[in-house]
Amino acid sequence: ANAGGFSAVCLLTAQRVFDALGGNVPVGAVESCIGGTNVEPWTPPAGSLWVQHMKELVPMTFRAALWDQGEHDAMKTNSTWYAQEFPHMILGWRDAFEVPDMPFFYVELCTEYGAEEPKEDDFWLAQRAATELPQVGFAVTTDVQRALHPPDKQDVADRLALEVRRMVYGESVVSRGPELLSAESDGTTVVLTFSDASLTTHAGIFVGDDDACAKAADSVVTDPLNNNQALNYTISGAKMTVSCASPSGLVGVNTDHAMCFLYGSAGLP
């Protein structure tokens, strides 16, 4: 009622951080966004949207920046190009605001939107290229909802705020889910080892059905070269053993075809 049309992701993330700091530290939030835009116009110094909507903010000082963009690029843009332009834009912002390591956090797309020319597969990796820069965090959302603009901003803000608390305020919080450490195959199975010894699987948030996620092959792991067929798997500690249904040896975990997902002990995918 009192926020009007302000960005829900921005406002809710600020609120989560405010609450985490005990409600005693003022947290300001500034919104500048235009829907349905590509990354390039936001890149300083000459990007049109940068000049119109960001340059006037340069005298201000920010502790962090949030970025919730990519649907248009994912459907229309070459992913290799985005993997170069996105970090370039971040460096441009840091240079313009004269904060070389200004923390930057982005919302990962909930789906990759297919692979139509001229784009390439795996826009998630194109986004993830930004993490090669220091002080860049992200929130995974593929288990939250499947929509062009998922209306569930609460869970997205929860995950962004964890990254902000860890990276900006130095809190000892788990802000990301398990990461893949290694993969080994003997020709019939693939053993994936993750960074969390308490792996669990269950339905996503508003995405899957818990009853369907109790089966041996429940879409947590799929074969990307065989119509995303669900593969059988077992979990023991930090290891997931997948039975391959095709000779490709490729498996997908928590893909945008999944209705059930792999989580770590902190409840993050």
Image (tube, rainbow, N blue to C red):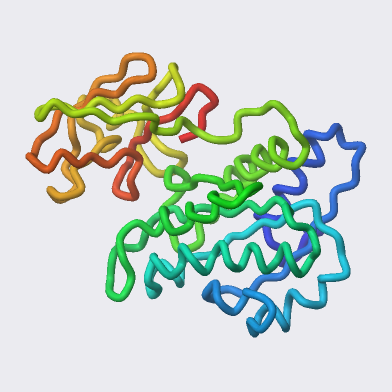
Q: Position of residue 107 (x, y in %)?
A: 55, 53
Q: Position of residue 176 (x, y in %)?
A: 54, 35
Using the rendered view, name the quadrant where residue 246 is placed: top left
Q: Is residue 54 above or below residue 15?
A: below
Q: Residue at x 38, y 75 (%)?
A: 76
Q: Quadrant of the N terminus?
A: bottom right
Q: How many marks?
A: 0
Q: Residue at x 18, y 43 (%)?
A: 223
Q: Nearer the viewer, residue 1 or 52?
A: 52
Q: Residue at x 46, y 40 (%)?
A: 205
Q: Residue at x 62, y 60 (%)?
A: 67
Q: Nearer the viewer, residue 84 or 117?
A: 84
Using the rendered view, name the quadrant where residue 146 is placed: bottom left
Classify residue 35 as left or right of residue 167. left
Q: Position of residue 84 (x, y in %)?
A: 49, 66
Classify residue 20 as left or right of residue 83. right
Residue located farthest toward the left when viewing the structure as drawn: 247
Q: Nearer the viewer, residue 18 or 131?
A: 131
Residue located farthest toward the top when viewing the structure as drawn: 236
Q: Position of residue 137 (x, y in %)?
A: 60, 46
Q: Is residue 190 above or below residue 206?
A: above
Classify residue 13 as left or right of residue 57. left
